[in-house]
Image: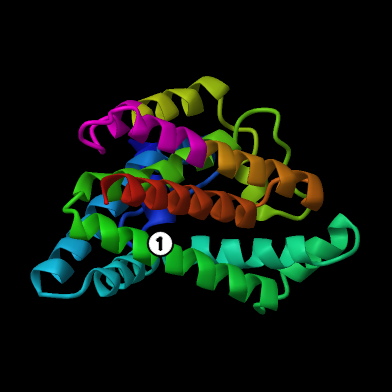
Amino acid sequence: MRGVALALSWLTVLPIRGPGHIDRSAAGAAIAAAPVAGLVLGLGTAGALWAAVAAGCAPLLAGLIGVGFLGLATRGMHLDGLCDTADGLGCYGPPERAREVMKSGGAGPFGVATLVLVLGAQAASFGALADARSWFAVVLAVTAGRVAVVLACRRGVAAAPGSGFGALVAGTQPLGVGVLWAVVAAVAAAWCVPGAWWTGPATVAVGLVAALLLVRHCVRRFGGLNGDALGAGLETTVTVVAAALSAAVG
């Protein structure tokens, strides 16, 4: 329960207090519980989409409202991480230079372009899922993004130099914890596409693999794992899973 409370405190705007002292043990428990926070956020996003559709919004507008709700509910921190990661990967120079660019506080052309592409894809995908009344697929896509975070923090992954959040969470998760969450998400996904049960699990697998490949590249490029790379991996999974499921149910 301590991990769930800290995960909700870290990953959502819910007024929940985590433990007063946060060490690697507490941080690891929170990361292990990240998919629980994803489930809460997914339910909220599906609710926002349902309300938008019920109010007569067009699918794309409903999708934009869903994306906006998710951004507000997470304080936009994962989108900020995605933007910073894109700018870091887009610059030249050694890892130190890339980390410096990521900490600059501004948004460069790579970051802006990546945000536009990802937010547009998510909005279109959420809108299509809402139009198909595939609410569970929305919940699954948002939750799967948080499963990717658990896998990215598996043991053996080092933190990037100077990364406060990365130093807390990198290498805290036994591989079995991430695999268990991935299996749960894949099994749940079997109910997302009527008549083609295998499509959902395959989509989750592709989304998680895409995120892990991105995070692995970030670890090599930045000299270790940081919070920005986790945000980028999370948003990648949400986008891939939502887009693939919207195509399958459409």
Query: Magenta part of the protein: which range?
Result: 187-207
The amino acid type found where label 1 is placed reads: Gln
Q: Is residue 56 visible?
A: yes
Viewport quadrant of the N terminus: top left
Q: Which residue corresponds to the image point at 56% horizontal and 24% vertical from the top-left?
A: 174
Along the horizontal axis of the image, is 138 left or right of 244? left
The residue to which callout 1 is attached is 122
Whether residue 108 sits left or right of residue 178 in the image: it is right
Residue 97, quarter of picture: bottom right
The answer to which of 19 and 103 lies nearer the viewer is 103
In depth, the one of 136 and 127 nearer the eye is 127
- Kindly identify the residue that appears in the image at 43 percent across and 29 percent down: 182
Residue 171: x and y, percent?
64, 33
> What element does badge 1 sit on?
helix
Quadrant of the rendered image containing residue 96: bottom right
- Position of residue 143 measured from the top left corner of the image (x, y, whole percent): 36, 44
Given the current orientation, which residue lies at the most extreme right position? Answer: 93
